[in-house]
Image (cartoon, rainbow, N blue to C red):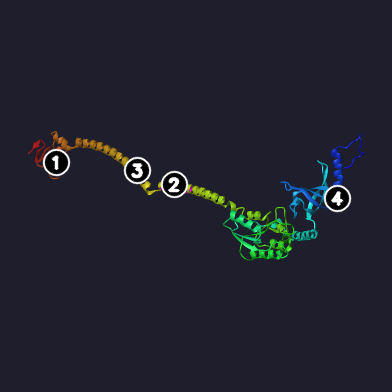
Amino acid sequence: MMFDERPDKDNPLTVSQLTAQVKGILEGSLLLRNIWIQGEVSNARQYASGHWYFTLKDGGSSLKCVMWRSAAANQPIAPEDGASLLARGKITVYERSGEYQLQVDQLRPLGVGDLYAQLEEIKARLVAEGLTDASRKRELPALPWRIGVVTSPDAAAFQDVLNVLRRRFPLGEVILSPTQVQGADAPPQIVRAIERLNAGDLCDVILVCRGGGSIEDLWAFNHEMVARAVALSRLPTVTGVGHETDTTLVDYVSDYRAPTPSAAAETVTRFAVDLPAYVEQGRFDLDALMAARLDGLRGALEQTEQRMQAASPERAIQSARQTVDRLADRLGARTESRLSVLHERLASEARALDAANPTGLLARGYALVRRLDNGAVVRSASEVEAGEGITIQVQDGRFNARVVDEGGLL
């Protein structure tokens, strides 16, 4: 940003305007980009955000530096007070205080510049081959019953790992594949240690561990053959090399990078430590499931019993018996009514018969005359002749007679 007029007492700049102009000049300069600065670190501090703030100084001056979290995560070393190192970055201006600073994107310790150049070349090859891709990262087993550890049996890091595993998951079996972890002989030994665990069905996951030290102490884990052995491991791998601020090539190609050996052991037992709680929750869920299932079965049983009772022959028989009883009552009532009607009719008929019965007439003094030869009733005197035999029936018997003439009996 440039001004149209030269500032003077009649047209002064504000502090913010001046700072903005200086910022534009410094940050716009190609000479102040991708520059390497060497010096001694002081006042180094990492914030919770992951950003680093420190100062580089020499005998005559000091330069404030900032390294954002995105850059810090990819550095093989961290700025530590008193360390002499090389820092690459660009000059920027922090407007609030009006100070210029170096925005760092890469750190290297003094004296190992060639090694870091080789490291960058190896890393570039691994990246180009896709060995650092996130898509290659595998899930770690939830409960690794057999845990392989690649480290020195005499290292304090191994004891730290054992302590964590025994405390968090005592059921797990630890299988040590011993190796040197520093020096010229370390890289091929580390490779063979990884291959031993991959050769058979020995374990479920591999921890590659080494305690803290200088960058030279950790350099075996920057060797290309070691990085490729980790990347091509058949089994999932977790690396815990150095301190939290240390990053080596194996961290880029492993399935999971832990900041320390102890953290690596905690990583592979992240679910195991909660196993009792999972078991208790599982027991609670199972009890609830069984209770619900039993309630459902109990309800189904009650419904089945109700249906069986409704379809029971005994119930049908009871219903039929009740129907028979009701029909018997109705039949009895109808029979009595019918008999009453018949009795009345019979009595009426009897009275009619009594009225028409000749014996009734005989009781009143009348007689019944029949022909003697054929028993035919004589209804008229003209039906018999004199001298013909007849039978005369009275109330208490009968007797024979003969006709004398129409006026009397012989």
Q: Tell which tag, 4 or 3, sits nearer the viewer.
A: 4
CA separation in Å, label 4 and label 3: 112 Å
Does 303 lie within the magenta span? yes
SS for callout 3: helix
Q: Tell which tag, 3 or 2, sits nearer the viewer.
A: 2
Where does the image place residue 166, in percent across and percent down from the top left?
59, 56
Q: Are marks 4 and 1 in contact (CB under 8 Å)?
A: no
For badge 4, the amino acid type reads: Leu
The residue shown at (28%, 38%) is 336
Where does the image place residue 301, in percent across and percent down from the top left?
45, 48
Q: In the rendered structure, find residue 32 and report the number of the disc placed on it.
A: 4
The residue shown at (66%, 56%) is 261
For badge 1, the amino acid type reads: Arg
SS for callout 2: helix
For disc 3, the marked residue is: 322
Left or right: 173, with 386 as reference point: right
Does 394 lie within the magenta span? no
In the rendered image of this protein, does residue 193 appear above or below residue 88?
below
Between discs 3 and 2, the one toward the N terminus: 2
Quarter holding residue 354: top left
Q: In the rendered structure, find residue 370 and report the number of the disc placed on it.
A: 1
